Amino acid sequence: MKIHRMKISTLLLCATFSLATVAQPQAATEPITPPYAESFANDAFVNDYTIVDVNNDGVTWGPYLGSVQISYNSNEAMNDWLITPALALEGGKIYNFSIEVMTGNGSYNESFEVMYGKENTPESMTETIIEKMQVAHTVYKSYSGTLSPSESGTYYIGIHGCSDADMLSISLKNLSVGEAKGASAPAAPSDLTATTRTNGELKADIALTAPTLDLNGDALESLESVRLMRNDSLIHTFDSPAPGAELTYVDEVPECSRYTYSAIAVNGSGESPAIETSAFVGVLEPSNPTGISLTEGSKPGEVILKWTPVTTDIRNNTLDPAFVTYRIYGGDGLATLLFDGITGDSYTFQATDDVSTQSFVQYALVAETRGGISDFMNSPLLPLGPAYATPFVESFANGTPATIIGLYSDNLATWKGFTNETGIESRDGDNGFFGSEGSYLQDSATFVTGKIDLSGLETPTLTFYTYNIVDGEDRDINTLRVSAIANGTVQEVKSFQICDLGDQEGWLKVEASLEAYKSQTIQLEFTSLHALYPYIFIDNLRIDNYGASAIETATSASVFIAGGQGEIIIAGATHERVEVFTIDGHLVTQQTIAAPEYRLPLTPGIYIARVGQTTQKVIVK
């Protein structure tokens, strides 16, 4: 069963012709002396044409959407004639014939032939103009031939629809019969090609060969000209070319589009039949930009967007970069055009004037030619503003990061905040942690931190906790990969399957050295890969000297630090200096402890308190 069929055309045609085997013209008219043309755009052509349903199946030629069409019969082969009005033709003369044909499907062959004879009946169609052809294309294509009656008189041309049973449809437009030509008029030129330039120029290289024979098949002695047309408009005349000469012309077109080129040869006896070809002329859409980077400029809030110049179009044809420009988009959804008409391989611009705190920026880059635009290609996320100090702590209290987190939206999984409502207690009792949620095997997601300044750390080390899920004999084979970003370069520092950390369910510690980045400013990049479970969780992300942990070494034997109601309580550190930081590393206050039990008033929140070698995360309620 063919599911592609649409029988609308069949119903329309049957409604008009199902009761008649032969539809004759309504009134006899004088024979028409060519040139003659019929577009079939107006249904009135049925008054002049003879339509013969030879197989009497009730499905035959008829008007349909500005054409003449015949549809299929599921059980019977097509056998239907569309016959022109009477034509007055001269014996010994040659007439060019052409018709545009389209089929209802590009996969199933339809069949037609064009004949002529002295009566408007199928039996009289004894002379061939176009041999029986099998065609399958869903755009109109022109087919042509010649007719040369041996004696003057009245003739008719018939288009015979003769497809096999259970095909689809044949549509016809723009039938034409040219004026009479002498038999010594040239044959048609040959080898007409139109090759578009893929380097960005709106030009086509046209090539063709002048004919060597006349319509009788005799050798041509000379030619007056060969005329080249684009969409039926003359664009160039080759004067007095030698028969068989290779002719070339460069055509510059007004816009990227599909054009039809044709050529005819001319001598003293008349014009040749036309040769025709169609081609898209102009540059295509460019391929997508690659190698996109986004870095900070020399001024605060300034960024530099760089890329590898586009050198090919979407079909991998070579494209001159000089014909490619670029657009930059930003704003919500990266949908606001910021700059266009950019040339080269980079662009520097002011991203923001406010760099008092860190924030992410990101942009989309689009390549453009006269043929269209590429896909939107996103830059990396770039944090602008002052880097976070160390020790750096992010505990995701109440499921909300206290520092900026950059999420990449093109992943199949999603990083987001979670609370104890999931049924898992946070590692440090602050009702929050971060996690990747996926739906299918191999789902992945990536997030990046803001800038973190490692200056002052002698042995910079990353520690965090991840949750090992245990379900019977199934091991947590989800993968977590951690990378450091420094100076625009991404380098992996840790990658593991979670089950490699241990067998017990619960939070397990992860540690990775950052000594390769000592004294540098970096970002951390976390990438999840789901292989079994839909969740990957992390908590208590910290960068500090090796062995330091404000979570695990809460106090020394002599120093006690704890959070209270609107205050931090410090004991055993008289005359020591206390420094209090926000969770993202900003200094809140620093004071000298004046009493054995010192109470420091603070607004509710999460803080890092440091006294000497003791550092503690505290929650002020």
Image: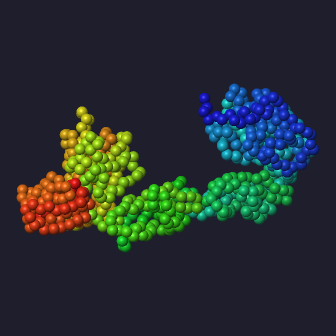
Q: Give the residue at x 25% y 64%.
A: 586
**The N terminus, quarter of image:** top right
Farthest residue in the top direction?
A: 75
Question: In the figure, 79 relative to 148: above or below?
Answer: above
Q: Give the residue at x 67% y 58%.
A: 207
Q: Is residue 35 visible?
A: yes
x, y (%) of residue 303? 40, 68
Q: Give the residue at x 25% y 42%.
A: 424
x, y (%) of residue 442? 36, 43
x, y (%) of residue 198? 57, 60
Question: In the figure, 601 relative to 502: above or below?
Answer: below
Q: Quadrant of residue 421?
A: top left
Q: Quadrant of residue 578?
A: bottom left
Q: Is residue 42 left or right of residue 280?
A: right
Of residues 265 and 412, the one nearer the viewer is 412
Of residues 361 and 83, the one nearer the viewer is 361
**What number of labels is visible?**
0
Farthest residue in the bottom direction?
A: 299
x, y (%) of residue 534? 33, 41
Q: How is the image coloured?
A: rainbow
Q: Is residue 389 visible?
A: no
Q: Is residue 330 left or right of residue 503?
A: right
